[in-house]
Image (cartoon, coloured by chain):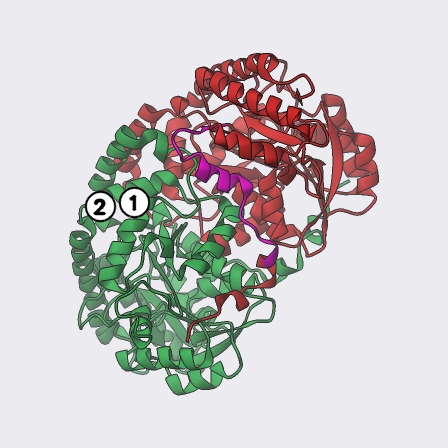
Chain colours: A red, B green
Amino acid sequence: MQTPWEYRYAHRTQRMGSSVIRELLKLTEQPDIISFGGGLPAPEVFPVKEFQEACNQVLTDHGAQALQYSTTEGYLPLREMIARHNARYSVRVTAEHIMITSGSQQALDFIGRVFVNRGDYIVVEEPTYLGALQAWNAYGAQYITVRTDEHGMVMDELESALRIGPKFIYILPNFQNPSGCTLSLERRMKLVELADKYGVPIVEDDPYGQLRYEGEHIPSVATLDSRYRNDNGGEYTGNVIYLSTFSKLLAPGLRLAWVIAPPQVIRRLVMTKQAADLHTSSFNQHVAYEVAKNGFLDEHVKVIRATYKQRRDAMLEIMEEMFPPNVRWTKPQGGMFLWGMLPENVDAAEVLKTAIERKVAFVPGAAFHANGGGANTMRINFSYSTPETIREGISRLGTTLKEALKNGKK
Amino acid sequence: MQTPWEYRYAHRTQRMGSSVIRELLKLTEQPDIISFGGGLPAPEVFPVKEFQEACNQVLTDHGAQALQYSTTEGYLPLREMIARHNARYSVRVTAEHIMITSGSQQALDFIGRVFVNRGDYIVVEEPTYLGALQAWNAYGAQYITVRTDEHGMVMDELESALRIGPKFIYILPNFQNPSGCTLSLERRMKLVELADKYGVPIVEDDPYGQLRYEGEHIPSVATLDSRYRNDNGGEYTGNVIYLSTFSKLLAPGLRLAWVIAPPQVIRRLVMTKQAADLHTSSFNQHVAYEVAKNGFLDEHVKVIRATYKQRRDAMLEIMEEMFPPNVRWTKPQGGMFLWGMLPENVDAAEVLKTAIERKVAFVPGAAFHANGGGANTMRINFSYSTPETIREGISRLGTTLKEALKNGKK
């Protein structure tokens, strides 16, 4: 007899759907589509030569160790390097505060697994990162959405959200995915204060913090939390779980990211990872360490910034020229995305269908809204395509939008 | 105020403990301990030169693709290669039947997530693989244990277990971890028949199937299931989810494994992986494909077999000489482990403490028993240490055991 598999699936998988973004990635595999849909780094900036040298070196010097099983926490020299970086960039931590994950998505999944009971509330920005919602939906999370404007999450609304008793606050302070907006210093300080007042932890997701193309670096939420507690530069014991990644600085194909948290939280995350996949590739950890250990990333990030700034500028310029006047969009100071807002009654998913016929793609914004809404919004990536391709793609999209807005959909 | 993190953790993490094996791996980092505890392949057989060439080739030819984000299912040429291998080794499948995972542990975790509701029963061998229990404990699984003997799971007891209505049967038919035993052909056929009769799927975990040192290959459970259904060599649509891995054939540090299942199950697993970590390292998938694409593994597995056979033989020989007469152990035809059975009232965990003082380690068997028991058993790995080290380590362990059995613990 045939096995009726669908009746064997667990309840938790019933909320599970395929990601809009992943499905779009498949579309972008058609070579003639100009895709602003994915969140892909520019392949032109991958340090291929440095990887080649690093692979050779690692296999020559540490082959047996790099190819063997390893500890769940991650490769100690890599964690120590991240600790040194973090002391400069954010707060003082040791390797005990750090676990290596297979991409930040895995860190989001593990945070869901460790913290979220079915029905627990999580405070998220509106819009927020779709991947986080996917990860936490699997654990039965519910969401309290807090409105954002061009300076990020609106703090007055956060306070009323905190009175509901959420498990934690999830925030992407720098060049947010999807909106491209940055949380202002003033609001970061208020966020830390409110989180402490209500005893609610903060998950700070910061994949793009170093990809700033103008303006001054704003201290991380963890840094401000540390100051608020008068840690005085001691090792971090605060209220923030901080995520970052090598995906945007080196290469996403390595699947290497890290989570920083008070050691007791790291220990719980390590137990979770033991049961989930034992550890992240020891080979990739060795290679990333080898590439980065002599300060290469400090130089390399300048190349990335220059490349992406040029692409962002090209996109903003051609949008100004080609987009209809009643379409608005954000002007991010960094990162990889900007956010388009169509007139209220225009459905971006419908626009996408026409856009794909014109061989250009973006992600409709509705999926980034945890509790519905946002049908008239769109996420547009500017890091992946060259300036020439951006001009061509945005021209096509501009034509599509003009048509859509004219055809009685406005 | 300090954050009381422990009150924020979810219910599911309360059954979570650190793995005995992982903790032991830490012990084995002391350079003077001879460890039979881990499940480590011999580093001497890692094909370091081939990896070096493959890394160079991949980065030269496909750098941009290998370092970029990729599809969740896995790298298509790699999946097609696995499909060709599987058609020879087991049943006929296409790339649609295959998803790449970050080690088999991740496949076990995803199977738990997709299938297991809190309180669901899973049929497991007694003893069974500890990592599977760890993965499924996180989803609230309960276990029905079925007794095993030297020919594997006892089929009469399986039938009564199936009448309880379990979600699936989990079985390691070849050179089982931990016992080293192999399920006989006759019992495999009975297993397939009983699973079909009660409509219960089978999860066949086969990391070691190609590591056979004597005797004839026995068809996989999936193969027998296919024959039972008169698939006549068509594409597989049966009742078995099959797991295997590159960890034992190439290198565990890559974290590369695969799951084979009917395409509808694969699609559900792919959605799970999207939310969990997006995809497995594209770089490692490219490198494994590059190493293996021209039939290298067929040759390489002969080297591994010769190496491990020698180590197994050395271990069995010295055990015969050094272990006390009232200790019994299995004689595996392949794989990486054998299983020691002490007199009923001797606690292997206590023996381990003395053993570590003598600088030798193994894993006490109790943790491999899903519902308790087995305190007098031990798992002993023979793949990692050289024959010389094995002789020294087993001598030390023999002395420890003689002492323990004499000291009134028998």
- SS for tag 2? loop
Around disc 1, counting alpha carbons within 10 Å, would you say few (fewer than 14), some (14 to 19), or many (20 or more)? some
Q: Amino acid at mark 1?
A: Pro
Judging from the image, what secondary structure is the residue with disc 1 in? helix
Say whether residue A393 is visible: yes
Above or below, B394 relative to A95: below
Which residue has dot 2 on it?
B293
Chain letter belonging to callout 2: B
Contact between labelled residues 1 and 2, with CB atoms less than 8 Å apart: yes
> Could you say which quadrant of the image residue B228 lies in?
bottom left
Q: Chain of mark 1?
A: B
Residue at screen point 32% across, 83% down: B326
Magenta stretch: includes residue A120 = no
Left-right relation of A206 to B224: right
The x and y percentages for residue B193 are 37, 81
Q: Say which residue label 1 marks.
A: B77
Residue A367 placement: quadrant = top right
Image disc number at residue B60: none
x, y percent for residue A144:
75, 43
Q: Of the two numbered discs 2 and 1 on the same chain, state the one appearing first in sequence.
A: 1
Q: Is residue A2 above or below residue A210?
A: below
Q: Nearer the viewer, residue B311 or A254?
A: A254
Region of the chain picked out in magenta, as a range: A14-35
Q: Quarter-wise, where is residue B302 in the image? A: bottom left
User: Could you tell me which quadrant the N terminus of chain B lies in?
Assistant: top right
Instruction: Name the one closer to the observer, A90 or B83.
Output: B83
- Residue plotted at (32% across, 30% down): B63
Is residue A67 rendered to the left or right of residue A32? left
Q: Is residue B372 visible in this depiction of the protein?
A: no
